[in-house]
Image: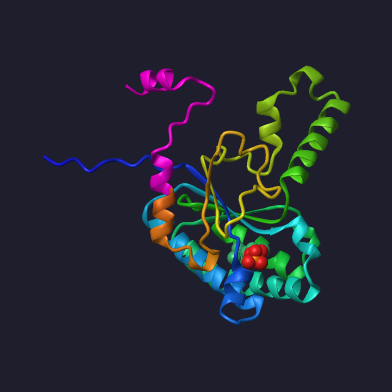
Amino acid sequence: MNATPTISKPEHIAIIMDGNGRWAKSKGLPRVAGHRAGVKALRKLIEHSVKIKLNVITVYAFSRENWQRPKSEVDLLMDLFISALNSEVKDLNKNNVKLTFIGVRTAFSRKLQNSINESELLTSSNTGLCLNIAINYSGRWDIVQAYQAIAKEIVSNKIAIEDVDEVLISNKLSLAAHKDPELFIRTGGEQRISNYLLWQTAYTELYFTETLWPDFDTKQFDIAIDWFSKRQRRFGKTPEQVELTQN
Ligand code: FPP
């Protein structure tokens, strides 16, 4: 009998969707057309993730640094977030996807905050794919807000300084509900983490591809997952030690 090889799928995948602007430029289109194509690519990837039963995906939709872009692009991105959320949330809900946003949402318009809050509420009891969307987020901000929360607990004598350890810090971060990402994917050719999930990616496998985000299709996503499944994750041990525990 031919057994189908089992691919070890990552439990949590973090994605930087880079290259929308260059994709648009290469086609003589305005940058916003690249972001619209980026939403389509994300939609397909989510449908595929539901189909192959992935557990958690965290995408970087807007960093704290992205506010520095031209106001016209920021405004168009905000409009796109609202329209994409409003048009997709019913389908996401039907597909049992649980939507969560990480980052400081109070910086956004009331309209966008309402769309965010409503989509989280609608999907809050879903049990399928957890889709985390990082908006107005940065990894350093996340660590700072965790430290502030811990400092408050120390000052109010809820905990002692000696109680502060890696587990406690992890539990105060925005993605405390999830295991750390096992696979990080960045499209668009740059090889950096860009202030994304800094604490959580300590042992993450990093996958970089030249493909621009709007062209990153399900086939390429599967290639990244397959690449991950072939990695030997050692966490500081020797290859021999790891092989022993696998046999
Ligand atoms: C980076 O490409 C992309 C962004 C800053 C925006 C990503 C957002 C989406 C794909 C929309 C997601 C929508 C929802 C509702 C979550 P870039 O503009 O930096 O591209 P470039 O490097 O080629 O200039």
Quarter where residue 169 is shown:
top right
- Residue 232, percent from left and from top: 43, 32
Q: Does residue 241 show up magenta in the picture?
A: yes
In the foreground, 46 or 112: 46
Q: Quadrant of the C terminus?
A: top left
* Left or right: 156 in relation to 234: right
Q: Is 207 positioned to the left or the right of 73 in the image? A: left
Residue 137, horizontal then vertical, whole percent: 72, 52
Q: Residue at x 55, y 38 (%)?
A: 204
Q: Quadrant of ligand 1?
A: bottom right
Identify the residue shown where x is 36% and y is 24%.
Answer: 246
Which residue sits at x=81%, y=20%?
Answer: 161
Q: Residue reaching furthest left?
A: 1
Q: Where residue 35 sits in the image (x, y, percent)? A: 61, 71
Q: Nearer the viewer, residue 242 or 63?
A: 242
Residue 55 inside the magenta-drawn segment: no
In front here: 31 or 77?
Answer: 31
Q: Residue at the far right: name it.
A: 155
Q: Where, by quadrant of the figure, is residue 94 drawn? A: bottom left
State the residue in front, 1 or 120: 1
Q: How is the image coloured?
A: rainbow
Give, as a single range, the part of the protein colored magenta: 225-247
Residue 118 appears in view: no
Q: Quadrant of the N terminus?
A: top left
Which of the 4 image quadrants contains residue 176?
Answer: top right
Decide: is 148 above or below 64: above
Q: Is residue 102 above or below residue 72?
A: above
Image mark count: 0
As drawn, is 144 to the left or to the right of 28?
A: right
Residue in the image at 60% along x and 65% along y = 19
> Quick check: can you spot residue 91?
yes
Locate residue 233, reporting x and y percent: 47, 31
